[in-house]
């Protein structure tokens, strides 16, 4: 039994080439997308398209869309700088860098989560200006519960970027399965009790489960007592400087999503959830090949 565990562990923690990494990601992405399709089928079967699901999607959108701008930009720039420090054979400096970047990103994400809780109506009106009455009230009530979502979702992005930087594509691929494995049973079990809110619960629990698993894999790359030590090589500042343009371009791309949601919010009830189902199915196709190749090639370059 111990030998099997060691074999699995070595397989997960063994760096891969671009070719094998791409194949691994493609294989597990296909499985993940099949599970994702099942999740959408369960969601559609339980709730269909209705105004409450519309309002819930709008409530989650600011936390997911805007927080991804911060975490994705930081994670993208962290990969090349992380590899550069690693090539200099300085493990202590590497741990200091990853600890400070994750701490700084977490601080920004928690701060943004506080804004969501304090000003829920502003963000709802931003994404769905045509909401009013019951839809607006329902969306505001749910947005107050997603204050931690930017933080836990951001950790997911940052931790997975460390796996990419280490070329641990097998581990990165398998972790993606956890989300739907956790989310699907929660939706099925809690739908009779929480109705559409079971989807929000599934999102939170599944993302936390992924974060915990990822932390186990990357925990040795952090050194907490180095957090308050002065960084003299400027790697953290360099990351922030390079991430700033990505945050700007990311914020501009969110405008497309806001326009889509704003238009859909003026249509009949269920239009937003119907559009989300369509976008999810479309993303399943494009992410299998393109996403897999971009993940490995970016790290290699």
Image (cartoon, helix red, strand yellow):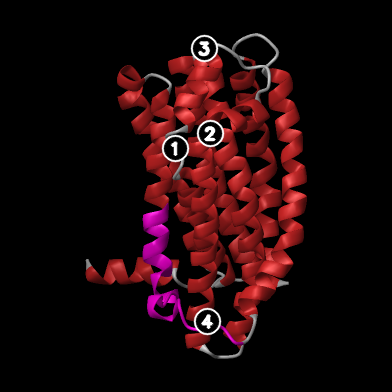
Specify the quadrant that holds the N terminus: bottom left
- CB under 8 Å between discs 3 and 1: no
Q: Spatial distance from mark 3 to mark 1, Cα to Cα?
A: 23 Å
The reply to whether discs 2 and 1 touch (Cβ–Cβ < 8 Å) is yes
Alpha-carbon span between mark 3 and mark 4:
51 Å
Closer mark to the observer between disc 2 and disc 3: 3
x and y, in percent, of residue 294 in the image: 70, 58
Does the residue at mark 2 contact the one at mark 3 (Cβ under 8 Å)? no
Q: Position of residue 99 (x, y in %)?
A: 48, 72
Which numbered marker is on residue 94? 4
Residue at left offset 45%, top offset 54%: 175
Residue corresponding to mark 2: 60
- Dot 3 lies on which element? helix
State how far apart marks 4 and 1 are (Cα): 32 Å
Residue at far top of view: 268
Residue 247, placed above or below residue 205: below
Q: Is residue 238 above or below residue 52?
A: below
Residue hosting label 3: 134
Question: Where does label 1 land, which residue?
Answer: 203
> In the picture, which quadrant includes the C terminus?
bottom right
């Amino acid at each position: 039994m111990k030998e099997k565990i060691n074999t699995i562990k070595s397989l997960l923690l063994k760096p891969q080439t671009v070719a094998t990494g791409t194949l691994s990601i493609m294989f597990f992405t296909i499985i993940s997308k099949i599970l994702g399709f099942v999740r959408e089928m369960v969601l559609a079967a339980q709730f269909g398209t209705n105004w409450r699901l519309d309002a819930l999607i709008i409530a989650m959108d600011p936390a997911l869309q805007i927080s991804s701008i911060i975490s994705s930009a930081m994670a993208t720039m962290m990969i090349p700088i992380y590899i550069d420090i690693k090539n200099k054979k300085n493990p202590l400096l590497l741990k200091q860098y990853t600890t400070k970047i994750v701490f700084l990103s977490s601080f920004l994400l928690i701060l943004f989560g506080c804004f969501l809780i304090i000003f829920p109506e502003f963000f709802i009106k931003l994404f769905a200006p045509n909401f009013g009455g019951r839809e607006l009230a329902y969306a505001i009530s749910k947005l107050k519960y997603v204050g931690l979502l930017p933080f836990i979702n951001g950790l997911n992005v940052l931790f997975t970027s460390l796996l990419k930087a280490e070329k641990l594509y097998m581990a990165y691929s398998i972790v993606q399965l956890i989300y739907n494995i956790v989310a699907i049973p929660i939706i099925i079990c809690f739908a009779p009790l929480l109705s559409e809110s079971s989807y929000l619960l599934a999102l939170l629990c599944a993302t936390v489960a992924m974060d915990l698993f990822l932390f186990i894999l990357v925990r040795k790359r952090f050194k907490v007592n180095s957090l308050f030590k002065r960084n003299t090589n400027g790697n953290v500042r360099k990351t922030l400087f390079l991430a700033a343009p990505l945050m700007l371009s990311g914020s501009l791309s969110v405008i497309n999503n806001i326009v889509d949601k704003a238009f859909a919010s003026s249509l009949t009830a269920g239009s937003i959830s119907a559009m989300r189902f369509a976008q999810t199915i479309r993303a399943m196709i494009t992410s299998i090949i393109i996403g897999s190749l971009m993940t490995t090639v970016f790290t290699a370059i």
